[in-house]
Amino acid sequence: MRSKPLIGLNADYRAAKKDSPAFTFVCAGYYDSIVEAGGVPIVLPPIDDDHDLNRLLDMLDGMVLVGGADLDPRRDGYMLHPSVRSLDVRREEFDRRLMRTIAKRRMPVFGIGVGMQLLNVTQGGTLLLHIPEDLPKALPHKDPIDPAHRHGLEVVPGSLMERVYGDGEIRVNSVHHMAIDDVAPGFSVTARCPDGVIEAIESTTDWLALGTQFHPESDSASALDLRIFEEFISGITGEVIEMRLVA
């Protein structure tokens, strides 16, 4: 029986407060989706030592970068927008180091929400800091009253997104106010909202790297959305088999 691929998950982090200790957590939808798609999830804490991080990554076949709050735009040379609700500093520092290491290794990676934004900026792309200001004619991408807010999705022919969704009307969840502006070199847009906001990117090289702005792991996702995880796991399984054949 072929072993299932080990898929790493970064996690969210909350610093200690007067009434609670510091803790690391991850929404169950991420690891449930990996299991359902045929992988084995492994949660990585925000460790500081690069040698230890590389030892962990040596054991993994791929990474899923989870969603969360906002990247601090000051780390990428921009001013802090008042709408930004930044990730905890410890998480963001680890996530950025993790993503740089993943890219150096060309390790399979699937970024979701802020995970996709991190993938993009780490590889040389840029972000819109607040859609309502940067794209005033855009559709609403976040509804504070309705966490299950959805909008349409237009996929690019020949992409992984098209393999997942095929033809017909597609609607996905939407809970973000930041978005990709300039796409990083080596990546292309594979899905947009009808207003033009980028909703998915994929590597144009042989690196298995993709991202979605929407959340296919969420309770508000459709059963079809899970197929993105299946395509990711399938791509990893194919890579592992190919490496063994070459060896």
Image (spheres, grey):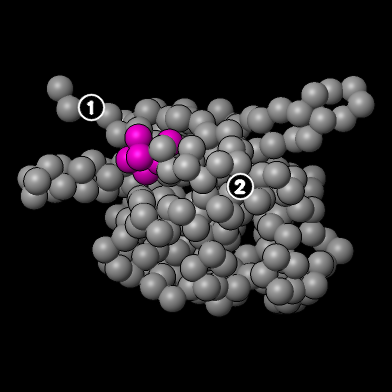
Going 52% across and 34% down the picture, which residue do you hit? 44
Amino acid type indicated by mark 1: Ser
Q: x, y percentage for residue 224?
A: 40, 43
In the displayed structure, would residue 48 be above or below residue 151? above
State the residue in front, 159 or 244.
244
**What is the spatial separation of the Cα atoms under label 2 and label 1, in whole angstroms?**
29 Å
- The residue to which callout 2 is attached is 94
Q: x, y percentage for residue 137?
A: 71, 76
Q: x, y percentage for residue 36?
A: 38, 29
Looking at the rendering, in which quadrant would you find the N terminus? top left
Q: Is residue 63 left or right of residue 66?
A: left
Where, by quadrant of the figure, is residue 82 drawn? bottom right
What label sits on residue 91 in the rendered view? none
Asked whether 58 falls inside the magenta stretch, the response is yes
Going 76% across and 28% down the picture, which residue do you hit? 22
Amino acid type indicated by mark 2: Phe
